[in-house]
Image (tube, rainbow, N blue to C red):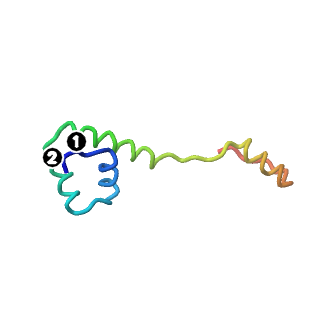
Amino acid sequence: MDIFTPENMIRFLYKETSAEETAAIQFALETDWTLREKFEILKNAIEGLNTIHLSPRPSAIQSLLRYAGIGKEVEHH
């Protein structure tokens, strides 16, 4: 494998590459500093995505509760 795309790196991070691909990527990461830098950026981005916690706005919840006929106030977290 001569060219490693972001898709290859993502598959590698999620352990979805074949044994041959894994070995080639590991070797490339050990020997190619520019690829290693790009890999670290991608790895950090993926780790950042895993830390995001999303929830609906309280006003959206309130609207749904009113629509459902439940007039209860929603606590803000």
Q: Residue at x 32, y 44 (%)?
A: 6
Q: Nearer the viewer, residue 35 or 40?
A: 35
Q: Local crowd at mark 1 within 10 Å, few (<14), some, or many (≥20)?
A: some
Percent position (x, y) of residue 60? Answer: 73, 44
Residue sitting at the far left: 31
Secondary element at image label 2? helix
With 19 as the anchor, is 14 left or right in this view? right
Q: Residue at x 22, y 63 (%)?
A: 19
- Three-letter amino acid code at the position of disc 2: Glu
Q: Is residue 48 above or below residue 22?
A: above
Q: Residue at x 73, y 48 (%)?
A: 61
Q: Nearer the viewer, residue 9 or 71?
A: 9
Percent position (x, y) of residue 17? Answer: 28, 59
Which residue in the protein does label 2 denote?
A: 30
Q: Nearer the viewer, residue 24 or 31?
A: 24
With 39 as the anchor, is 24 left or right in this view? left
Corner quadrant of residue 40: top left
Residue at mark 2 to residue at mark 1: CA–CA distance = 7 Å
Percent position (x, y) of residue 38? Answer: 28, 39
Do the residues under discs 2 and 1 have CB atoms within 8 angstroms?
A: yes
Percent position (x, y) of residue 59? Answer: 74, 41
Secondary element at image label 1? helix
Q: Residue at x 39, y 42 (%)?
A: 45
Q: Local crowd at mark 2 within 10 Å, few (<14), some, or many (≥20)?
A: few
Closer to the N terminus: mark 2 or mark 1?
2
* Quadrant occupied by the C terminus: top right
Residue sitting at the far front: 2
Which residue in the protein does label 1 denote?
A: 36
Q: Is residue 35 above or below residue 13?
A: above
